Image (spheres, rainbow, N blue to C red):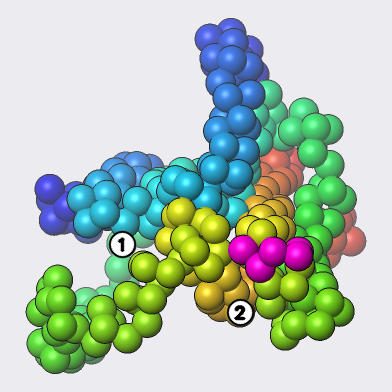
Amino acid sequence: MMAATVLAIIVQRNLFSVVVLAGVYSFLMATVLVALDAVDVAMTEASVGAGISTVLLLGALYLCGGEEAKPLSRPWLPLVVTLVIVAALVYGTLGLPAFSDPQAPIHTHVVPRYLTQALAETGVPNVVTAVLASYRGYDTLGETVVVFTAGIGVIALLRRRRRGKEDGK
Amino acid sequence: MRREPVLRVVGKLLIPYMLVFALYVQFHGDFSPGGGFQAGVITAAAIIFYALIFGLPAARRVVPEAVVEAMVALGVLIYMSVGFAGLALGGNYLDYFVLAHDPVHGQERGIFWVEIGVLVTVSGVMLKIFYVFAGRGRESGGG
């Protein structure tokens, strides 16, 4: 079903349906994540991927029109580059431990301590929250700063342009 | 879209629940899926919903741009000041154990404030991006 959505996104020339299909794709992805028991991530995917980014893409669509432009030339070189990178990434996944292998390094290093001690050490039953905000507090601080920087960047870029336009009038 | 009575009524009915749900996701994030990031996105989505139905100026009146811009920075400041509070009370940066007499209680308190910081920054950034996009559309669309 996800593959069908992706194919529809590629084939569609009308950007409005592409945006809606991207939202559909996000919801399907969220369902997959729920099936994998990653409910926190699924929630983020559903709200950000299907909610906010759909609205933002629709806003961008309103600015630049709803039909995809025809490509000027046949993009063979980018296609080859993409295929090579895909091949390299797939080759890389062959080196990973098998899916849900209990002996994988990620399951033997610090995760047992998180799973068994998180409630006693932090008093928070949801291990994801405990890891996110306490054990990995620095990382979450970094993420928050990344979000902050992105916001500041957007403000700086779009605001200046708007002011320039007003000066032009 | 402003004259759509169905949308207006449904929006008025739904938006309070969306905000309450965001708060639930925020403060119940300790026990169930959720946390600052998700709650921030839901808060921003509720206000964006309001802006879509009632128009951008109405949303700007409810949540002025200056407040949104302040929120962007304020969240990071809350997060960092939790870290500095740990320093001031004799721990390492972002050490929550020292925030209360009981280490576990200190952890809970630290996580609580950190999540609030994330909520404030995330919802501020999302709203600000939407405002900027929608504002540009208004200028080029309406002349």
Query: Which residue is located at x 52 percent, y 56 percent?
Result: A124
In the image shown, does A128 or B103 lie closer to the viewer? B103
Q: Quadrant of residue B125?
A: bottom right
CA gap between label 2 and label 1 equals 46 Å
Q: Quadrant of the C terminus of chain B?
A: top right
In front of the other: label 2 or label 1? 2
Under mark 1, the amino acid is Lys
- The reply to the same-chain question for discs 2 and 1 is yes
Query: Which residue is located at x 10 percent, y 87 percent?
Result: A94
Subunit under mark 1: A
Tell me the chief SS of the magenta region. loop
Query: Was residue A4 drawn as part of the magenta stretch in this picture?
Result: no
Mark earlier in primary sequence (2, 1): 1
In the image shown, does A39 or A167 lie closer to the viewer? A39
Start-end of magenta stretch:
B100-104
Q: Position of residue B106 (x, y in %)?
A: 69, 64
| Lateral position of residue B111 relative to residue A124, left or right | right
| Lateral position of residue A68 relative to residue B91, left or right | left
Q: Position of residue A50 (x, y in %)?
A: 40, 46
- State whether residue A81 appears in this view: yes
Question: Which mark identifies residue A70?
Answer: 1
**How packed is label 1: few (under 14 Cα within 10 Å), some, or many (20 or more)?**
few
Under mark 2, the amino acid is Tyr
Tell me how many marks there are. 2
Residue A28 vs A136, above or below: the answer is above
Query: Which residue is located at x 54 percent, y 43 percent?
Result: B28
- For disc 2, the marked residue is A138
Does dot 2 land on a helix, a strand or a loop?
helix
Q: Hey, which residue is sitting farthest front in the picture?
A: B102
| Lateral position of residue A40 relative to residue B132, left or right | left
